[in-house]
Image (tube, rainbow, N blue to C red):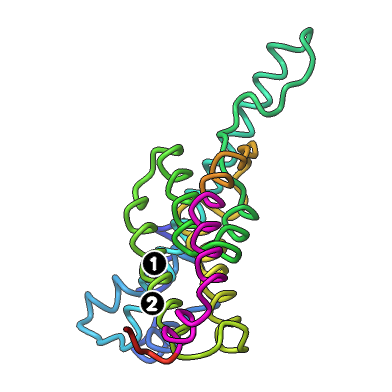
Amino acid sequence: MGNGYERMVAKMTDEELLLHARHYQTYQEELLMAVLNEASGRGLTIENKAAIESLIRQYEDEARHQAEVAELEKGREDDQQVEETEGPDSSKSLPVLYSQTAVLAFSLFFSPLAGSILLSINIRKLQRKGAGQVLVFGLVLAIAQGIINMQVAPDSIISILAHVAGALLLSELMWNQFIGRRIPYTRRNILIPLLIAIAIIAPLAWYLYQHPELMEQLQNGTYE
């Protein structure tokens, strides 16, 4: 298939080649790669080359995730055939991960850092790279939300939107990038991380409740 695309783009004029590059979103990965290679060979400048390369990487990531899902599904089918007499056990070959909903909830109700910790544990469980990046991203989000809360009221629309946006970035963008959109897994119990989060947050919340003037000082940007 790749050779077919290369022969096809080799017959295109420069204008046709550049036209395909401008409308890159409508074409498949193999054709886009052939267009870039042909343009490079002709010495043509593709203004949106970076965007095309980014789309190609997305195609490759999606294909890799689909291959992983197919491999896991195949393993499940093999296990069911081998252990048919023992009854079905669809979760045996699946990784045990904190769910996407758990990452979202911890990011919303506790802190983006809490959600990023759960997500990084999942990444390490799958033996993939990116756990450190996710932790740093969660820390940056937590700091940014803290700064916003010091400038506006915690119940303001800006503060609420900032918390929701941070939680969605972790549970959607980061999850899809490092875990995968449709990866099958067994839900991991969140009791232990929930108790740890409550043990950390509860004393802080109680202290702020007993000293409301401290919250006012933080919001006004003053410290005594």
Q: Is residue 148 above or below residue 204?
A: below
Residue 79, horizontal then vertical, whole percent: 66, 19
Q: Main secondary structure of the magenta part?
A: helix
Residue 213 in picture, x, y percent from top left: 48, 82
Identify which amino acid the numbered label 2 is placed on.
Lys
Q: Position of residue 26 (x, y in %)?
A: 55, 77
Residue designated by label 1:
7
Q: Is residue 25 above or below residue 172?
A: below
Say which quarter of the image contains residue 153.
bottom right
- 70 up-or-down from 109: above or below: above
**Residue beneath disc 2:** 11
Q: Height in image: 155 above or below 94? A: below
Q: Identify the disc placed on residue 26.
A: none
Q: Which residues are magenta?
A: 197-219
Mark 1 vs 2: CB contact within 8 A: yes
Work out whether residue 126 or residue 5 is closer to the camera in this orientation and state it: 126
Residue ID at (38%, 79%): 51
Question: What residue do we see at 63% from left, 24% from top?
Answer: 92
Residue nearest the observer in this picture, 44 or 87? 87
Q: Circle 1: is it few (<14), some (14-19), or many (20+) Cα within 10 Å?
A: few
**Residue at far top of view:** 85
Residue 212 colored magenta?
A: yes
Locate the C terminus and report the quarter of the image it occupies: bottom left
Give the side of residue 65 with respect to residue 74, left or right. left
Q: Nearer the viewer, residue 25 or 186?
A: 186
